[in-house]
Structures are given as structure tokens and as C-alpha cells.
Image (cartoon, helix red, strand yellow):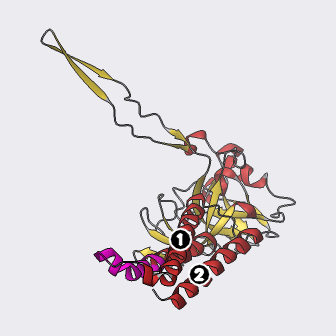
Amino acid sequence: MTLKKAYQTLIITVILMMLTIILYALRVTRLKLDWGMTGFVIAAILSLFSVVFAIHQNKHLKDIKQSNWISKHRFEILDWFTFLSVSLMAIFVLFLFFILPSDVSQGSMTPTLEDGNRIIVYHFKYEPKLDDIVIIKITQDEFPELNDSYFYKKKTVCPLVFKFLNNDCVTTIVLDDTNSPVMLDAIYFVKRVAGVEGDLVTFIEAEDYAVDFIEQNKRYHISINGRIYQNPYNEIYEFTYLQKAIIQEGLIANKLPDNKLLVFGDNKNNSTDSKNFGVVENSSIMGKVIFKLSPFGGVK
């Protein structure tokens, strides 16, 4: 690494650091990625260390003995080291503020998104729009209607086993054989935006249940701005009396209030969505699914 290249790398490192500080201060994303910020800080420290060391080596080139392979190739090593560090910084900036790869771990958006699909989420200054496929941050405080079981993640603990030989008998002591679940602070759902603020939301009795005089037994279709809602596969959704009541609780004069959304999964028969937890705050939307990495292709 030449002295000129070392200073160029230093400038790039400082620019990336300043860019990160500015974007963080402007709060251009609702996602908080602690691991991403930690990775960026580590990469920045490594880059600064490499650049400072390279500048020092260049200025004291005559005083340094080239007695071994590392001494002879130290500038090539520093070149690669700074390249990797700066590249990692750029990648972390991309993940922290613009796009983020993620996995789908639910079947509520089948067949649009299948369990195990790899996706790209765009989250820079994102505001949800009708028909967008979005990522929703779910917490117990904001979604009290959801059962606590949604927030538990199974933890697999490998038991620590000690065996003792006593009078030709083996005594086994297991210190930890629990598989107790872990309580999560937040979970993330992927859904489609079906209604936005200002939309008129009404319910129409499904024909098969219209003659049932017991209100709780009836089923309903949801109408948004005068049209019965269907997913992209032309499937019409049915709602129970309780599900209708949950959604209506979040409406004002049958309209979605400011900064409120309706979200549904494309899998109409197996999705936990607005029919279970009601309308969603704009602030709970973390980003938009814009692409599938695996299998490779777009999303509609």
C-alpha cells in the first residue's frame, strides 16, 4: 500500500463514518440492528488501524528490516486488510439504512412467499402503500390481542451429563435437561397491505350464512372502498363475528384512521393478521419486501 492509497482509504473510511452518523441522526429507518452497528464499529476500527499502520510503515520504510515474509509483503497484506475492512463498512451501511436480506419463517404469505424463502427488505425512509408486502414488528404491548405463545421461541439445551461408577453401578447426573422456551421482545410478520388511512371498510354477510339468525354464527366478507377484498389469486376472505369486531374496533366511522393500516396474509386460510390483532400502526411497519433471493425472482 502506497502512502497515497493509504490517505485515500482514510478519506473513504471517514466519509463512511460521517455518513453513518448522519443517517443515524436523521432516523431514516425504523429498523434497529444492534449487530449491524457493532459490526460497522469493529470494521471502522480495523480500517483506521490498518491505514494508520500503513502510513507509519511508509514514513519509516528505510528503518524497517525486511527479515521475513511478513515484512516483505506487509503492504500487500495491509492492502487486502483495508479493502476488506472498508468493504465491510460499506456492507453494514447498506444493511443498516437501505436494504436487508432476511428469511421467511412462516407460511402466511403462501404462495407468494413460502416458508424458507430468502428475501430482500427495503427500509430507507419507507412509508407503506396499498398492496405492498411489508414486514411488521409485533410486540406484546402494541398487540395485546395476540396470544403469549407467539412470543416464545423454543430453546434446545444440550444436557450436561456426569456419570459415576459406584459399586459397579453407573450413576448419571444431568445438570440441565430443560427445553424451556425463550421469551422474545418482538417478532416479525410478513403481510400484504390491504387498506390504508382514509379507506372505507365495511362488512357484507356471506351468502351461505345470511339466513342464520344467530349473529355469532355468521360469516362476513370485507369490503374496502366498495370492493370485496381478494388476494392476488382472486380468493375472497371470510371473517367470523369476532374477527369482524376486532377490525371494527380500530375504525372511526367505518374508516381507517390516520397512520393506520389493514394487513392480511395471502394464505387466506392460515394467516395471523388484522383479523386477529386489528388495525396496524404505520410505525410498526419496518420495510417492504422488494425481491426474492431464493428462489431468485421478484414479488407481486
In three-dimensional space, the C-alpha distance between marks 2 and 1, rounded to whole angstroms, equals 10 Å
Q: Is residue 79 magenta?
A: yes
Relative side of 56 to 79, left or right: right
How dense is the environment of label 1, judged by Cα within 10 Å: few (below 14), some, or many (20 and up)?
A: some
Q: Residue at x 49, y 37 (%)?
A: 181
> Where 214 falls versus 99 (above or below)?
above
Most distant residue in the left direction: 168
Tell me, yes or no, if residue 63 can be seen here.
Answer: yes
Residue range of the region highlighted in magenta in the rendering: 67-83
Q: Is residue 191 above or below residue 234?
A: above
For disc 2, the marked residue is: 10
Q: Secondary structure at mark 2?
A: helix
User: Between 229 and 158, which is closer to the camera in this rendering?
Assistant: 158
- Residue at image x 33%, y 32%? 159
Q: Is residue 275 above or below residue 56?
A: above
**Which residue, as the protein is rendered here, is positioned at the far top?**
167
> For the residue marked with disc 1, what is the amino acid?
Phe
* In the displayed structure image, the side of residue 239 where residue 59 appears, left or right: left
- Residue carrying label 1: 49
Q: Is residue 219 visible?
A: no
Pick the quarter of the image with the N terminus: bottom left
Can you give x and y, in whole percent of width and height, for residue 68 in the image? 29, 75
Residue lying farthest to the front in this orientation: 63
Magenta segment, prevailing SS (helix, strand or loop): helix
Residue 256 inside the magenta-drawn segment: no
Q: Look at 69% across and 46% down and name the residue there.
A: 242
